[in-house]
Image: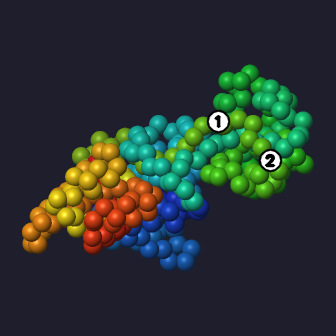
């Protein structure tokens, strides 16, 4: 194999691992991992994957050990590495929403505002991000690195924490409230400048970005096909959501046409009964792997 035509890519290990592999699978790339291995195999010989925690990804891409990698925008900001963002992808371990980096304190505790953190102790994995946030607010506080399980540290070990949250449920379970949101974050595909200026690697990155974004676009969409009486097609077309014009094809049976359209999955459950009552037949809903705009 010509090693110059190999893209060294970092994929996140941990909470995002399964969601990331699922996204790659819909994009057409199948990863497999054996036991505790950090070097998964993939059915594309032009990819050389390595699994790392998202927190570590930016520094290894910046050093050129990896050409590119998937990490959180939050970790990129905390690290401060100068990397090119190839694309942003909004997905998480539970939802398709961005995560939030939040400052949280004990509910009904003495800290009611950011100003109350003056001279206090804060635990976080986002040390640099938190320090910059406090500096912008003119607050002097002790920021200590935490290895995780931050929620259990308030109020006995520290006065506040800065953590990422997708739903906020863990914070509520530990009797914590969000005092302020520092930023929202999504998964980003990043590359170093050497990889981006290499013509082959840039083309590979752009292709990968297109397919991954296409897979994400398809997450909330489904295809819907149906047979429609020709004399009722205007009525049935009017039932479809605005801007969702169907592909219309003639059928062998005179007086009938076939409609095919891509729709939001949540809209279809209410739409199918209406279409059926309006005369549509043979309605088939099917999942999508990729939608490229």
Give the residue pinned by disc 1.
182
User: Where, quadrant-wise, is the N terminus in this rendering?
Assistant: bottom left
Residue nearest the viewer, comparing 125 with 7: 125
Mark on residue 176?
A: 2
Spot occupied by residue 50 in the image (x, y as percentages of width and height): 46, 62
Residue drawn at 37 percent across, 61 percent down: 274
Name the quadrant containing residue 258: bottom left
Residue nearest the viewer, comparing 221 with 41: 221
Spot occupied by residue 49 in the image (x, y as percentages of width and height): 42, 63
Residue drawn at 50 percent across, 77 percent down: 34
Residue drawn at 22 percent across, 64 percent down: 228
Residue nearest the viewer, comparing 213 with 6: 213
Q: How many marks?
A: 2
Spot occupied by residue 190 in the image (x, y as percentages of width and height): 43, 46
Q: Is residue 184 above or below residue 206?
A: above
Q: Earlier in the sequence, mark 2 or mark 1?
A: 2
């Amino acid at each position: 194999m010509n090693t110059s035509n190999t893209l060294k890519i970092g994929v996140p290990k941990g909470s995002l691992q399964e969601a990331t592999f699922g996204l790659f699978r819909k994009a057409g790339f199948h990863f497999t991992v054996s036991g505790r291995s950090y070097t998964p195999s993939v059915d594309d010989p032009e990819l050389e994957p390595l699994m790392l925690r998202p927190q570590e990804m930016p520094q290894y891409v910046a050093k050129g050990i990896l050409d590119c990698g998937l990490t959180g925008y939050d970790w990129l900001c905390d690290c401060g590495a100068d990397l090119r963002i190839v694309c942003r992808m909004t997905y998480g371990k539970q939802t398709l929403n961005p995560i939030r980096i939040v400052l949280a304190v004990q509910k009904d505790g003495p800290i009611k505002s950011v100003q109350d953190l003056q001279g206090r102790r804060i635990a976080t994995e986002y040390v640099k991000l938190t320090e910059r946030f406090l500096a912008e607010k003119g607050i002097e506080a002790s920021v200590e690195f935490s290895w995780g399980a931050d929620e259990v540290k308030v109020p006995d070990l520290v006065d506040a924490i800065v953590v990422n949250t997708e739903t906020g449920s863990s914070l509520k379970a530990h009797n914590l409230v969000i005092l302020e949101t520092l930023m929202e974050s999504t998964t980003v595909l990043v590359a170093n400048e050497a990889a981006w200026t290499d013509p082959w690697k840039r083309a590979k990155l752009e292709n990968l970005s297109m397919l991954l974004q296409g897979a994400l676009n398809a997450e909330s969409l489904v295809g819907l096909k149906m047979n429609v009486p020709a004399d009722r097609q205007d009525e049935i077309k009017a039932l479809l959501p605005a801007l969702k014009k169907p592909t219309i094809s003639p059928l062998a049976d005179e007086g009938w046409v076939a409609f095919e359209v891509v729709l939001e999955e949540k809209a279809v459950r209410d739409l199918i009964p209406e279409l059926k009552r309006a005369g549509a037949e043979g309605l088939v809903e099917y999942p999508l792997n990729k939608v490229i705009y």
